[in-house]
Amino acid sequence: MSAKRIDGKAFAADVRAQVATHVARLKEESGLTPGLAVVLVGEDPASQVYVKNKGIQTREVGMNSFEHKLDAATSEADLLALIARLNADPTVHGILVQLPLPGHLDSDLVINAIDPAKDVDGFHISNVGLLGTGQKAMVPCTPLGCLMMLRDHLGSLSGLDAVVVGRSNIVGKPMAQLLLAESCTVTIAHSRTKNLAEVCKRADILVAAVGRPEMIPGDWVKPGATVIDVGINRIERDGKMKLVGDVDFASAVEVAGAITPVPGGVGPMTIACLLANTLTACCRAHG
Ligand code: GUN
């Protein structure tokens, strides 16, 4: 039987509608408008598209969007000075520095210069530590979106075997922490994992976040498993450009219980969660 498709597009629209309702209430009751500052250094085409979409969706939910586009040759000192200004600006509740940064800039240094309370990406070392120790943290947007879809589909995740394929700081590691906090038995698999097929096949929850097109075939999927595909890979097929995930959807959909498609699965949830995090940061800043 074919798996249920988890509709991330509809889910994200729902999250954005809830955020918009809260933002409207906040304005009415406290005169506050949450503000998100996005910093883009250089002209990476994919980053430009993401930043533009973030701005559009931020304004659509009634928040202020502040975009800072800096030259690719911007010095670290100038970027740090901008972050210091944004940290001190009371109209800015969330700060996001679009990654990757040009090679001459130290991403860790830059991210850790953001006020952790405004770190809506959840990448600051303080937020990483808070998440890892089960304390109130800003949670990275993509894993947060994955968790919301998993909870919505499965209810309790307690005791389930979860396999996260990929160990990035942005997705794999925080995803594993979130699943652990839900009382899953968590395995993080990666490029050096032995018998990856067998490891994947044990998973009740399989999260693929490796960035390799269609790497996980249906016969690595446990029958009935919930498959979350974080990959967004641009490939050429039959002379056309196409977006595909890290999972081979055509074969996995025949085995899984539920699966996120690409596009229209995890992707739309990331910005929706960014907006939710910005609202949270604003509410926390104003008690
Ligand atoms: N580049 C790709 N994904 C992300 C993300 O979630 N946040 C930031 N800041 N940069 C990214």
Image (cartoon, rainbow, N blue to C red):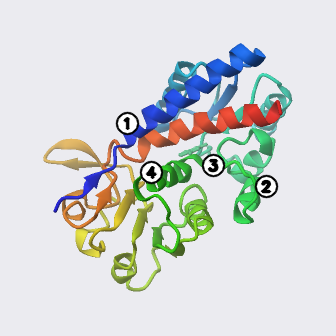
- From the image, tell me which residue sits under label 4: 152
Where is residue 157? Give x, y as percent.
50, 65
Foreground pick, 197 / 285: 285
Is residue 286 placed above or below 184 in the rendered structure? Answer: above
Q: Residue 162: x percent and y percent?
A: 47, 71
- In the figure, is residue 80 to the left or right of 52? right
Q: Tell me the residue that label 1 is attached to.
A: 10
Check residue 126 in the rendering and tell me which mark sits there, or answer none: 2
Looking at the image, the residue that sits furthest to the left is 238
Q: Nearer the viewer, mark 4 or mark 3?
A: 4
For disc 1, the neighbor class at 10 Å (few under 14, some 14 to 19, many from 20) is some
Q: Tell me: is circle 1 under 8 Å from ligand 1.
A: no
**Position in image of residue 21 (x %, y %):** 57, 23
Q: Say which element carries label 2.
A: helix
Give the answer, above or below, for where 201 lies relative to 37: below
Q: Nearer the viewer, mark 3 or mark 1?
A: 1
Where in the figure is residue 108, as x and y percent of width and height?
72, 53
To which quarter of the image does residue 120 belong? top right
SS label for mark 4: helix
Mark 2 or 3, nearer chain start = 3
Name the amino acid, label 2: Ser
Q: CA distance from mark 2 to mark 3?
A: 24 Å
Q: Earlier along the polypeptide chain: callout 4 or callout 2? A: 2
Which mark's residue is nearer the viewer, 4 or 2?
A: 4
Amino acid type at circle 3 is Gly
Secondary-structure class at tag 1: helix
Residue at 68% x, 28% y: name it: 37
Q: Earlier in the sequence, mark 1 or mark 2?
A: 1
Q: Quadrant of ligand 1?
A: top right
Q: CA distance from mark 4 to mark 2?
A: 28 Å
The label shown at residue 103 is: 3
Mark 1 vs 4: CB contact within 8 A? no
